[in-house]
Image: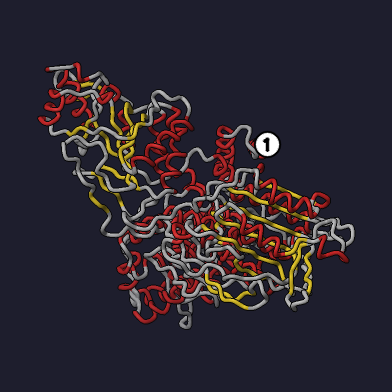
């Protein structure tokens, strides 16, 4: 390096082990061509150093990431500092391997006899010394590589090698001089790895770090390496439950909506671990009452000798569960006395202590059979009897669904308590997810033993603070629908979209909102006569058994018309298939008829959605306002009769929507798919739907949709509850077409913004948006301002699911950066969310970030080892990253788990390739 060169260096540090790419240089001299006349030496072939240069850049990238990870380390929370250390160590050691591989390749290059070898090295030095892409501090990353090259060049005594050696020496001298200025700051970053002798000026280092933070963020680096920092648990993490008065614990004095899960008779070699895996998915702790003979034996010398199954128990403790005593042989202890009784109790306690020194003092009498002597033995051993008030009867009932139904019915009756299960039955394993799903959805908390009593950890997935308003279902007993679509008009212009729109709405009601097909009256084309439509309301619904706690959804796609009455008032009509344009008053169905129908309905809430343009319908009031925090509870008390129309008089329904739908119905379908959930609580009200659909349709067409309440309404709001999307993204996952994505982008541009939506912070979950307000047409053609209801309070688990669902929506629209952010939010809320982990990995995969994708697929498998699709995805990621052996192993595992799965043929093909 000359006097004018300024360099900085540091020992290379960073992460991902990547196999260094092969180098296209010649290791032996090229043989001369055949002599024709006079021998002519072949020109030496140029050396391709692109792979080496790429390796240098990989070293630099890892070096930069470590700096960003540990910059401002003192400001990090303890959990974030620990995770940064974990990833930083990985970056450092993997980059060390990368440097070793580059050194070996450089050694081979310098040792070759190719005349161009030294020029190739000089070209790499040009990059290190003068690339405009490098900051001065960046060059510190190449110190070890330059020293290694210098040592290799020193063994060559040719004049070009001597000159190159001198250049390298000047570079290293300049680096050493600058290093002294950086020692203090860089020692803070790299001191954890090895001793550095580097100093640098504070101002320059801070400027450098600031520039790196524009390239990388700590959160992104961690996420790329398979780590998402969860939101911290509040300091006040537990609430002590009330103790039972009489010493024995039955569960009656637990706080409302608090459940203790207990499992007897284990450990089992298979089912205990499967139950623990299920509990982990719900962040639900449990107490496992263990039979001593399963754990081992107590010798004559009083020493415990543990059996292999004791390892199962240790893993339960590691998983955060509690071990408790269930006697030595599961005998009926009410019939035992003396030493035999004492051995049953105390012997198992000794074995439990051998497994876990902090074993709980809890004891459960087999069969619940106890006597006064047995209770006295417990007192002497400082143990405490735990009974139950919710019996699953899983030891007797062979049907998992029946077990689940029994538990849930008893929980509903008791409102709290201790549930008795057994971890020795497969049927218990099968019943458990359905039970936990329902308990979480209903806002129950899971308590465990803290050494003194039962506590509930707040801030964990599935837990809801005691006393907080709980998210519940809308509370409908049943759902009904009338869906009408008419294309083939006899005397009106034929349509191209209506029948298809009606079919799509019907499918959405069934697939997304669990409407029973038998409760949906579908009328298409020739079936949709005036008589047929009215009969659907007056006859089919009247005799169907509709109850006052039900809901009715009505959809009509077809022609609409407006007629001016002698009073000057407009009256709107929907046009049946057999209507004559010259006989509207007698052949069509006036809005006044629909008003009468709406008022006479038995259902609690009814929503009419009319994909037709007309005007003239009396309005009694607007949509529901912001509401209270108990929106669903209050809404259930009020009748609701609402209508959303596609447009007003003299407007034509735009039929240019994607997939052959009208613009209005396409927008409606997108709203029902989740976009209409404006406040992010998993509930779509009719008001929210109108607030999404009306401005969006107006923005992309000449239609002005209208919304309002019909006569007879008491302010109730029709409610759709979004089902959790459990799709694990994979190569078979569908995405929207280009025209659909383009349309959705236009619709989203008109989406109403929350009034005061607060941003997410580093230590708090992304808050639900505040109520949105929007001005739309009312049913008389005037303007009204509607405000969406206040978000229904949600548990952490529900918030995580909603974030995942939004991510899936964005993935289908190929908005990968936004989808990545949503899946990340889901994992912050719920670190053990296998679904979100897989989906985050697949978003990386779609962006050709195969190493990052593999890390998240690996995380998915750690969370849920039996998730077959994750192995298929992992195989693809490994294959794309060039890790053939790992890919083949992943594909093979997929085939073991899902030999007849949808990806089985593909996986076999990939395995056979190698």
Q: Position of residue 4 (x, y in %)?
A: 48, 83
Horizontal arrangement in the rendering, residue 725 relative to residue 73 (left or right) = right
Q: Position of residue 465 (x, y in %)?
A: 33, 55
Pick the front one: 791 or 225: 791
- Colour logic: secondary structure
Which residue is farthest front?
Answer: 566
Q: Position of residue 603 (x, y in %)?
A: 57, 52
Asked if one can make out residue 819 in the rendered structure from this viewpoint, the answer is no
Q: Residue at position x 79%, y 59% from top?
A: 497
Residue bearing the label numbered 1: 905
Q: Residue at position x 61%, y 65% from top?
A: 710
- 91 over 308 or under it: above or below: below
- Name the quarter where the C terminus is drawn: top right
Q: Residues within 10 Å of mark 1 (few under 14, many from 20)?
A: few
Asked if one can make out residue 438 in the rendered structure from this viewpoint, the answer is yes
Q: Position of residue 78 (x, y in %)?
A: 30, 60
Horizontal arrangement in the rendering, residue 59 relative to residue 513 (left or right) = left
Q: Residue at position x 36%, y 51% from top?
A: 463
For residue 186, which quarter of the picture? Answer: bottom left
Which residue is farthest left?
Answer: 380
């Amino acid at each position: 390096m000359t006097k004018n060169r300024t360099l900085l260096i540091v020992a290379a540090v960073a992460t991902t082990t990547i196999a260094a790419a092969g180098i296209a240089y010649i290791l032996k001299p090229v043989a001369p061509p055949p002599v024709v006349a006079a021998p002519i030496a072949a020109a030496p072939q140029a050396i391709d150093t692109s792979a080496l240069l790429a390796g240098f850049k990989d070293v630099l990238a890892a070096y930069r990431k470590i700096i960003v990870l540990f910059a401002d380390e003192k400001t990090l929370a303890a959990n974030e500092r620990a995770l940064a250390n974990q990833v930083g160590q990985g970056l450092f050691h993997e980059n060390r391997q990368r440097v070793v591989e580059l050194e070996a390749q450089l050694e081979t290059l310098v040792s070759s006899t190719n005349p161009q070898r030294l020029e190739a090295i000089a070209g790499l030095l040009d990059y290190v010394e003068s690339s405009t892409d490098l900051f001065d501090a960046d060059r510190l990353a190449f110190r070890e590589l330059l020293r290694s090259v210098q040592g290799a060049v020193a063994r060559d005594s040719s004049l070009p090698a001597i000159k190159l050696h001198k250049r390298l020496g000047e570079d290293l001298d300049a680096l050493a001089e600058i290093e002294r200025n950086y020692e203090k700051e860089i020692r803070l970053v790299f001191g954890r790895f090895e001793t550095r002798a580097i100093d640098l000026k504070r101002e320059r280092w801070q400027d450098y770090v600031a520039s790196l933070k524009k390239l990388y963020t700590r959160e992104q680096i961690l996420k790329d390496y398979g780590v998402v920092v969860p939101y911290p648990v509040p300091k006040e993490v537990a609430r002590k439950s009330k103790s039972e008065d009489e010493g024995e614990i039955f569960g009656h004095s637990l706080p409302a909506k608090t459940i203790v899960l207990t499992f007897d008779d284990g450990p089992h070699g298979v089912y205990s671990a499967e139950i623990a895996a299920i509990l982990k998915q719900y962040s639900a702790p449990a107490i496992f009452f263990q039979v001593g003979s399963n754990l081992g034996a107590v010798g004559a010398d009083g020493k415990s000798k543990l059996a292999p199954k004791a390892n199962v128990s240790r893993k339960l403790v590691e998983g955060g569960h509690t071990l408790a005593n269930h006697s030595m042989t599961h005998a009926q202890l009410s019939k035992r006395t003396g030493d035999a009784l004492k051995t049953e109790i105390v012997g198992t306690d000794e074995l439990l202590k051998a497994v876990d020194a902090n074993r709980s003092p809890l004891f459960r009498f087999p069969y619940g059979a106890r006597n006064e002597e047995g209770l006295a033995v417990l007192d002497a051993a400082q143990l405490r009897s735990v009974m139950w008030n919710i019996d699953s009867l899983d030891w007797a009932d062979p049907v998992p669904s029946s077990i689940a139904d029994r538990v849930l019915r008893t929980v509903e009756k008791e409102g709290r308590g201790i549930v008795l299960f057994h971890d020795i039955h497969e049927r218990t394993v099968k019943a458990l997810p359905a039970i936990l799903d329902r308990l979480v959805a209903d806002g129950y908390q899971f308590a465990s033993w803290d050494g003194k009593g039962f506590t509930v950890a707040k801030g964990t997935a599935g837990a809801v603070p005691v006393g907080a308003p709980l998210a519940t279902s809308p509370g409908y007993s049943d759902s009904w629908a009338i869906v009408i679509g008419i294309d083939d008009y006899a005397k009106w212009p034929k349509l191209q979209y209506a029948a298809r729109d009606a079919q799509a709405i019907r499918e959405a009601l069934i697939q997304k909102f669990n409407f029973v097909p038998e409760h949906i009256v579908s009328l298409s084309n020739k079936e949709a006569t005036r008589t047929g439509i009215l009969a659907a309301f007056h006859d089919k619904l009247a005799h169907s058994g509709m109850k006052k706690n039900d809901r009715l959804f009505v959809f009509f796609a077809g022609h609409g018309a407006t007629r001016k009455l002698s009073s000057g008032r407009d009256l709107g009509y929907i046009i049946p298939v057999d209507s004559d344009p010259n006989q509207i008053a007698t052949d069509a169905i006036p809005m006044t008829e629909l008003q009468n129908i709406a008022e006479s309905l038995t259902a609690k809430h009814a929503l009419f959605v009319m994909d037709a343009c007309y005007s003239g319908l009396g309005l009694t009031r607007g949509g529901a306002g912001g509401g209270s925090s108990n929106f669903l509870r209050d809404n259930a008390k009020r009748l609701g009769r609402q209508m959303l129309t596609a447009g007003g008089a003299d407007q034509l329904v735009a039929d240019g929507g994607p997939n052959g739908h009208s613009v209005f119905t396409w927008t409606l379908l997108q709203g029902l798919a989740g976009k209409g959930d404006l406040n992010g609580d998993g509930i779509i009200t009719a008001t929210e739907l109108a607030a999404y659909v009306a401005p969006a349709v107006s923005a992309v067409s000449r239609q002005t949709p209208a919304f309002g309440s019909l006569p007879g309404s008491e302010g109730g709001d029709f409610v759709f509850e979004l089902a959790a999307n459990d799709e694990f993204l994979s190569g078979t996952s569908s995405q929207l077409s280009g025209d659909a994505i383009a349309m959705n982008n236009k619709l989203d541009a008109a989406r109403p913004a929350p009034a005061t939506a607060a941003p997410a912070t580093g230590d708090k979950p992304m808050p639900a948006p505040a109520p949105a307000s929007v001005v739309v047409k009312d049913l008389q053609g005037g303007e009204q301002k509607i405000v969406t209801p206040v978000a229904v309070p949600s548990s952490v688990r529900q918030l995580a699911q909603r974030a995942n669902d939004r991510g899936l929506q964005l993935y289908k629209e190929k908005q990968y950066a936004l989808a990545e952010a949503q899946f990340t939010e889901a994992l912050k809320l719920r670190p053990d969310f296998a679904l979100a982990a897989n989906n985050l990995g697949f978003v990386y995969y779609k962006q050709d970030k195969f190493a990052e994708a593999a890390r998240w697929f690996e995380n998915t498998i750690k969370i849920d080892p039996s998730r077959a699709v994750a192995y298929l995805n992992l195989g693809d990621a490994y294959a794309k990253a060039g890790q053939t052996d790992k890919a083949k192993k992943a594909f093979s595992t997929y085939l073991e788990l899902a030999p007849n799965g949808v990806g089985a043929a593909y996986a076999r093909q990939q395995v056979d390739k190698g």
